[in-house]
Amino acid sequence: MFQKSSLRSRILTRLGVGIGAGVAAIVALTGLAQAHVTVQPGSAEGGGFSVVAFRVPNERDDASTTQLRVTLPKDQPIGSVQTTPMAGWKITTAIRQLDKPIEMFGEQLDTVVAEVTWTATAGGIRPGQFQDFELSLGQLPESGELVFNALQTYSSGEKVNWNQ
């Protein structure tokens, strides 16, 4: 995961899922244009940390959802991305090197999480069901819009790209 995870864990523990100091603008957590995979909530306080859930319905009658891959915004790197353990799912992250480091709590970060993948280990999301996949994200931009891309994979092998 992170090379400096203990420092980030201490910082996040102190801040919790806090709100940025002062009055911050609302950050729209959109993306997934025309998607059936949605981000919950649709907006969050800018400048702080927020827990968001990617709501994934299974829209097939004959296959289960067995994987979800969420790609984080490349043009707005997020310094802290944390997952929540989920029964029946294996979670992996991919890291990317930044061209220009970002600062987070006085620390220069030159790598960030690029994508998070949840892979079913116990059947996945069955037809007619949905599941929420949570991430803790921070520090969010003061204002603007974050665009997340999602790739949903079914047990039939079909892949649906929810960012087109």
Image: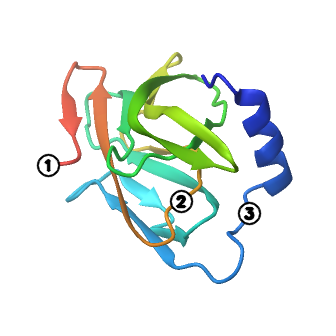
Amino acid type at image mark 1: Gln
The residues bearing labels 1 and 2 have C-alpha atoms spaced at a distance of 24 Å
Dot 1 or dot 2, earlier in sequence? 2
Q: Residues within 10 Å of mark 1 (few under 14, many from 20)?
A: few
Q: Position of residue 58 (x, y in %)?
A: 34, 41
Q: Is residue 8 left or right of residue 59?
A: right
The number of numbered discs placed on residues in the rendered structure image is: 3
Q: Position of residue 88 (x, y in %)?
A: 58, 23
Residue at 20 percent across and 59 percent down: it is 34
Q: Which mark is residue 18?
A: 3
Q: Is residue 136 something one can see in this rendering?
A: no
Dot 2 or dot 3, earlier in sequence? 3
**Nearer the viewer's eye, disc 3 or disc 1?**
3
Q: Position of residue 105 (x, y in %)?
A: 70, 50
Amino acid type at image mark 3: Gly
The residues bearing labels 2 and 3 have C-alpha atoms spaced at a distance of 11 Å
Q: Residues within 10 Å of mark 2 (few under 14, many from 20)?
A: many
Dot 3 or dot 1, earlier in sequence? 3
Callout 1 secondary element: loop
Q: How is the model colour-coded?
A: rainbow
Residue picked out by circle 1 = 164
Q: 57 or 106: nearer the eye?
A: 106
Q: Quadrant of the N terminus?
A: top right
Quarter location, residue 67:
top left
Callout 2 secondary element: loop
Q: Is residue 120 left or right of residue 155?
A: right
Q: Which mark is residue 140?
A: 2
